[in-house]
Structure formats: structure tokens, C-alpha cells
Amino acid sequence: MPALSKALDKLQNKPTDFKWPQVERIMLHFGYKLLQGDGSRVKFYNKEKNSLLLLHKPHNPKTLRPYQVDLIINKLKEDGYI
């Protein structure tokens, strides 16, 4: 749990070096299911909240762009997880 807590703290500080595996860990922890779309498109769906987040999985390096970090933060706030 400490790694998850650290990742959440880091996410909320809007880092410029947030990595894709950290996103997957956080979203799966909160009950989102990862659904692969076409190419690099992915969806995180939370059945309990009936909530959907659409993203493009980053390529090399696997670092998210600032707008993606904002989308994730906003979705987790909207769904009441942070």
C-alpha cells in the first residue's frame, strides 16, 4: 500500500514524469478495469461508478503528458476517490 500511496501523492502534485505503470496500478486499485481499444487507445471503466476514462497509452518513453495527468486527477475526484 505504501507504493500506491506514494503514487497517488505524486499524481496529485501533477508531475511531468508520471509513468504509465503507476496509472494502471492506481486505476486498478480503485476498481477500474483496463479495456484495450484500437492501437494505443485504452479505456478505464469502473462498473460500480459507471464511469469511463479514455486515454492514449504513451509510447517511449512511457511518461504521461500533463493533460493526461489532469484527466486522471479529475476523473478520480469526480468519482470520489481523491
Image (cartoon, helix red, strand yellow):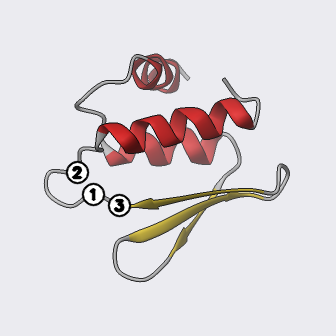
Residue type, numbered disc 2:
Lys
Task: Identify which residue is drawn at 81% across, 58% down.
Answer: 47
Q: Give me the C-alpha separation between circle 1 and circle 2.
A: 5 Å
Q: Quadrant location of the N terminus?
A: top right
Q: Quadrant of residue 81?
A: top right
Query: Mark 2 — residue?
Result: 62
Q: Is residue 33 left or right of residue 7?
A: right
Counting from the top left corner in percent of width and height, residue 77 is at 67, 29
Q: For mark 1, does the 10 Å Cα neighbourhood hold few (<14), some (14 to 19), or many (20 or more) residues?
A: some
Q: Quadrant of residue 51?
A: bottom right
Image height check: is 28 above or below 8?
below
Task: Decide which of tag 3 and tag 2 comes sooner along the chain.
Answer: 3
Q: Secondary structure at mark 3?
A: loop
- Asked whether 76 or 4 is in front, the reply is 76
Q: Are marks 3 and 1 in contact (CB under 8 Å)?
A: yes
Q: Is residue 24 left or right of residue 52?
A: left
Counting from the top left corner in percent of width and height, residue 17 is at 23, 32
Counting from the top left corner in percent of width and height, residue 69 is at 41, 37
Residue type, numbered disc 1:
Pro
Q: For mark 2, does the 10 Å Cα neighbourhood hold few (<14), some (14 to 19), or many (20 or more) residues?
A: few
Q: Residue furthest front?
A: 67
- Asked whether 47 or 71 is in front, the reply is 71
Q: Are marks 1 and 2 in contact (CB under 8 Å)?
A: yes
Q: Are marks 3 and 2 in contact (CB under 8 Å)?
A: yes
Residue 40 numbered mark, or none: none
Q: Secondary structure at mark 2?
A: loop
Residue 57 numbered mark, or none: 3
Query: Mark 1 — residue?
Result: 58
